[in-house]
Amino acid sequence: MLIMIAKRMAYMVLTMLVVSLLLFLLLEASPGSVATKVLGPYSSDEQRMIWLENHGYFEPIYARYFSWLGNFAAGDFGESIRFKVPVAEILWPRLWSTAILGFWAMALIIPIALVLGVLSGMKEGSIQDRVVSIASVITTSVPEFASAVFFITIFVFGLKWLPGTSTMANGFDPLQLVLPVMVLVIYDFGYVARMTRASMAEVMTTHYIRTAVLKGLPYRRVIMNHALRNALIAPFTVIMLQINWLLSGVIVVEVAFAYKGFGALLLEASLNQDIYVIEACAMVAVFVAVGTQTLADIGYTFLNPRIRFS
Amino acid sequence: MRALKSFALLRESWVGMAGAFIVAFWIVMAIFAPWIAPYDPLELMQPFAEPGAEWKGGGTFWLGTDSLGRDILSRIIWGSRTVLIYAPLATICAYTVGIVMGLLAGYRLGWWDMILSRIADIVLSFPVLVLYVIVIATIGASGINIVIAITFASAPGIMRIVRGLTLDLRNRDYVAAAQTRGESDWFIMLAEILPNARGPLIVDACLRLGYVVITIGILGFLGLGLPPPDPDWGGMVSESRSLAMAFPYMAVFPCIAISSLILGFNLLADGLREISLRD
C-alpha cells in the first residue's frame, strides 16, 4: 500500500517536471522574444541585450531551466510584465476566488449527480431513467458560454432577479455567485450522473443483489446496504477527475461573468503574453489536475477491496 | 450499400434519428449557405435592428442585426460552414495521429507502448482548455493552429481507446493467420486490426465531434478563434457579449445554433451506441 502511494507520488512529481520543461521550452526557449515581451516592442536592441545579460539569459538553456525550476519550487514566480508586481501577489487572491466558485459548484454537482444517477440506475429503462438520461444529454450539449448567455437573458434581462456580472467590486456578494455556479453545475452534473447510472445499473445485475432480493429483503435495504456501497466506488473517481474539467469550465465562466478568478487571469496573461503569469497559472492548473488524479487513484484502491488485498 | 444498411439500423433508434436529422440540417445549411442566407454575412446594413424588423432596402431581418448592422440569420447560416469545415478537419487529424499511436502502442508493445503511453498521460493530465489557451495564445489564432492544438490535445485520448481495442484484437486468429502469411506489421495493423475496431471508434468520433464543436465555440468566445470578420458562432457571441444586457438576441441565436449542433452529434452518438450494444 505504502509502496503504491509512494509510486503514485513519484509519478506525479515526474509529470510536473516534464510539464514544466515543456512549458519552459514553449515560452522561454528563445531569449530574444522574452526580452521583447518584457521590454515591449519599442525597446532598442541594446536595451534588450542589457536586460538579457542582467537576468542571466546568456547561460546555456539547461542552466536557465534549472535555475527557473529552483525559483519556482521556492515560490518565486517572477514579476508580472503587465502589473509590475510579483506574480504571487496576483495569483493567490485569484486562486482563492476560484476556489470559492469551484467549492460551491462541486457542493451542488456531487449530491445532484449522485441522487439522479442512482435513481435512474436502479431501474434501467424506467421513466425516471429515460428522463434523467435525456436531461443529461441536453445539459452537456450546451456549452458553458451558451448557458451563461441563456441565463443572463432569462434572469438578468428578462426577470431582473440577479446581477449579470460578478466582479465583486464592492466586496463579496453571494448573489453574484449564483449564475456562475449555476452554469458550472448545469454543464458538469450530467457526466457524473451518467457514470453513476452506469455503475449502479451494473451493480443491479450482479448475483448478490439478486440473492438479496430473492431472500426477501425489503427493496430499500437492498439498495441502501448492498447496492449503494459498491455502486459509489466508480463515481468517486469520476468526481475527482471532474475537477480537471471544472478547471476548464472555470475559465469560460469567469470570462463570461467578469469574475476575478484564476481562469480569467490565465486568459488575460495569455492574450498579453505575460509569460511569468502564464507559467505560474499553468503549473498551478497542472498541479491541481495531477494532484486530484493521484488522490483519485489512491482513494480508489482504499475504497475497492478487490484491489486493496491483491 | 453498407451506408444504407447502417442508416436502416439507425431508424430503430429515435434518439439517433433525431441527432442525424439535426446534423443533416446544419450540413444542408452549410452546403447551400449562399442560396439560403437572405443577405451577405459581411454586408453592413442597419445596426441594432430588432428581430423581425423590416429593412428599407427590402426584406426582413428575421433574427435582427448586430452592432455593425450585419444580418444575424445570414451570419449564423454562413457560420455553420466555418464550424462544419474545421470541426471534422480537426477530428480527422486527431484520429489519424491517435490511431497510429494507439496501433503502435497496442501491437508492438514494449518500448513503443511505454513511451507513447507516458506521452499520452502527460498531455491528458493538462486541463484541456488551459492547454488550448496557452498553445493558441503563443502560436497565434488561426484556423490551422486551432486544428493543430485540437489534434495535440485529443490524439492521446483516441490513442488510449485504440490501444485498448488493439490489445484485445491482436490475439485473434485472423491476426495470427496474417502473421503466418508473412504480412508486414503495418498491413496487419491497418488492414486486419483497424477495420475490426471501427465500431467503438465511430461512436467515439461522434461524441468527439461534439466536443470539438464546443472547443471551437469556446475559443471563439474567448477571442482565440478564427480572426474576424468571417462569421464564426463563438466569435459572434464574443462580439455581442458587452451588449448582452441591452440586446440579448445578438448572443442568444448563435448560442442556440451551436448548442443544437452539439446536441445533434451527442444524440447521434447515443443512437449509434444503442444499436451497437444491441447486436
Image: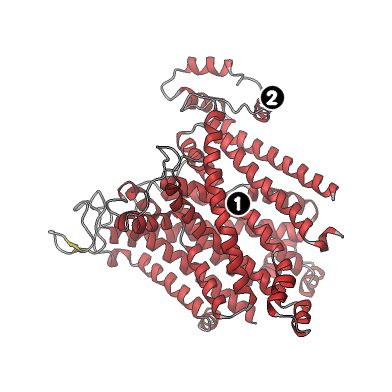
Nearer-the-camera pick, A155 or B36: A155
Q: Residue A285's spot in the image, x, y percent?
A: 60, 42
> Eyeballing the image, is B43 above or below A265?
below
Quadrant placement of the C terminus of chain B: bottom right
Q: Residue A22's spot in the image, x, y percent?
A: 63, 38
Which residue lies under the disc numbered 1? A243
| Residue A63 marker | 2
- For the residues marked 1 and 2, what is the alpha-carbon distance in whole angstroms? 35 Å
Q: Quadrant of residue B82?
A: bottom left
> Eyeballing the image, is A194 above or below B154?
below
Q: Residues within 10 Å of mark 1 (few under 14, many from 20)?
A: some
Would residue A212 be found to the left or right of residue B56 on screen?
A: right
- The earlier-in-sequence mark between 1 and 2 is 2
The three-letter amino acid code for the residue at tag 2 is: Ala
Q: Residues within 10 Å of mark 2 (few under 14, many from 20)?
A: few
Q: Residue A220's spot in the image, x, y percent?
A: 68, 76
SS class of the residue under badge 1?
Answer: helix
Nearer-the-camera pick, A263 or B123: A263
The three-letter amino acid code for the residue at tag 1 is: Ile
